[in-house]
Every structure is written in C-alpha cells, then in structure tokens.
Amino acid sequence: MNASLAPKEGKPLYSLLMQKLLKKMASSMKPDERLPAEREISLQYGVSRATVRQALAALERMGRIYRVQGRGTFVSPQKVHQGLPGFYSFSTAMKKLGKTPLSLVLSFSEREAEEYLAEKLKVHPGLPIYQILRLRLADNEPMLLETSYLPVERFPGLTKQALEESTMYRLFRSRYGVEINHAIEAFQSVQTDARTAQYLGMSRAVPSLRIERFTYERGRIIEYTESFARGDQFVYTVRLEPSAKEEFS
C-alpha cells in the first residue's frame, strides 16, 4: 500500500515521515522488531532515500530506534527513566512504572574475600562474604544482571531461600535492623559481554550500562553490587541546582 506523504507548510518531509513511523511503531510494532529497509520505506511513503535516512537518524537520536550493523534498524524497547540523586530501588521503580518486578536468585554462595573484593568492601582479605547473582525482571523482561557481595558477619544466617521470599533491602531492615545512611553509584557504558547478553536477552552489539553500588551503614560498607543494565532500556537523569552562592554558566 502506498501512503505517499503530502508536504505541509512549515514541516519538512522527513519530520512528517518521522511522525508516521512513530505512529506505526506505537500501534503495530513490538520492541526489538525490525523496521523495513530504507528502500521499502521510500517506496511506501513516496519519499526519497535521503528523506528516509534523515527521518531514521532523527529517530535514532531520540532513542526510538537502534541500528545493528549488518542486520538492520529495530524498534527500541521502552526505556526506564531513573532520576538521580535518590536511593534507587529496582522493585519500587518498576512498580511506579506499572510493571511487575521479579528477582531471580541465580546463585548464592559463601566465599573468602580476595584482595579485589576486600578492597571494595573495605574488609580484610580472607574475610567470609556472600556472593549473590540475581536477574531482575520487569513484566518478565530481563532488565538487570546483578552480583552483590555482603560481609557474612553483618548478615549471619542469610540464605538463598530468604532472598527468594523477600527483597534484599527489606531483609536488611526487618531481619538485620540495617539503617542505610547513603549509597554511592558509578555508571559506565561498556561493551556487552557474552554472559550479560545471554541473561538479558540482548545483542552484544548493544552497549550495557555497568553500575557499581556501595551501600553504607554508619560509614561502613555493607554491600557492594556490580550490575549490568540494558543500555537500550535505561535512562538516568540528574537534577542540578546551584547553591546560594553559585549560578549556572
């Protein structure tokens, strides 16, 4: 079917095409579904290939589509917008978006902290720690792959079953009386490795967001977590405010 675009005063053709494509993606296409090739779009809407490329470039800048070299152009999944600063809870954030959160405990073990992890947790090497690997889902879609490390002495008797029956932070409060003072997170865009791609059901061509979290109780680190989030589904925003003596420039 030919749906040729008619030019409108003050609106370039690529903008009209972009709106048509947005409407089509919202009404009849699924996340990660491949768009027609440039030539097909050109023929369908009666516009030049240059106009198609301009519209697709604009949609890519908006984060509505993504490209995979050699495979084509795809509809971007709905992004999770997380505001910073503010203590982040995956379960709470998903519920606010109307999604059903789920955490799968993939593995739970006790080990000795080698130098790398001892430095992260600020404990002596060899101290027993828990290692917990979890897959976080929203509406059964994988969103985060998390590995958490906790000192055993602060959380004695912690079990995999307990983590499967409650959220980790709820356990912190109810069973161990934890009073979290603050957390520090660092974000870095990284190339997706094979394990992360497999668990999150994504292409290695799509970058991941690596998140390091250090959670503090009275100045002591009680949790170190390394997470990998889908780079095509998470957007973090920061509200910046000048102090009384400063101005934006």
Image (cartoon, grey):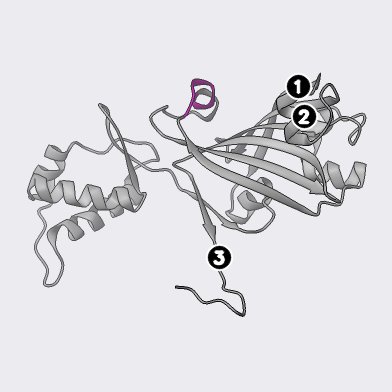
**Which residue is the site of mark 2?**
118
Where 66 sits versus 96, above or below?
above
Q: Give the number of the mark in front: 2 or 3.
A: 2
| Stretch in magenta | 192-197
Task: Identify the residue at image location x=25%, y=26%.
Answer: 70
Residue at the spot x=57%, y=41% of the render? 139
Q: Residues within 10 Å of mark 2 (few under 14, many from 20)?
A: some
Looking at the picture, tell me which residue is in the foreground, 23 or 55: 55
Q: Is residue 29 above or below residue 109?
A: below
- Main structural element of the magenta stretch: helix, strand or loop? helix
- Classed neighbour count for the residue bearing mark 3: other residues with Cα under 10 Å, few (<14), some (14–19), many (≥20): few
Q: Classify residue 180 as left or right of residue 92.
A: right
Q: Quadrant of residue 150?
A: top right
Report if the CB atoms under discs 2 and 1 are less than 8 Å apart. Answer: yes
Residue at left 79%, top 36%? Answer: 122
Question: Would you say residue 141 sits in the magenta stretch?
Answer: no
State the SS at label 2: helix
Cα gap from disc 2 to disc 1, whole angstroms: 6 Å
Q: Give the label on residue 114, or none.
A: 1
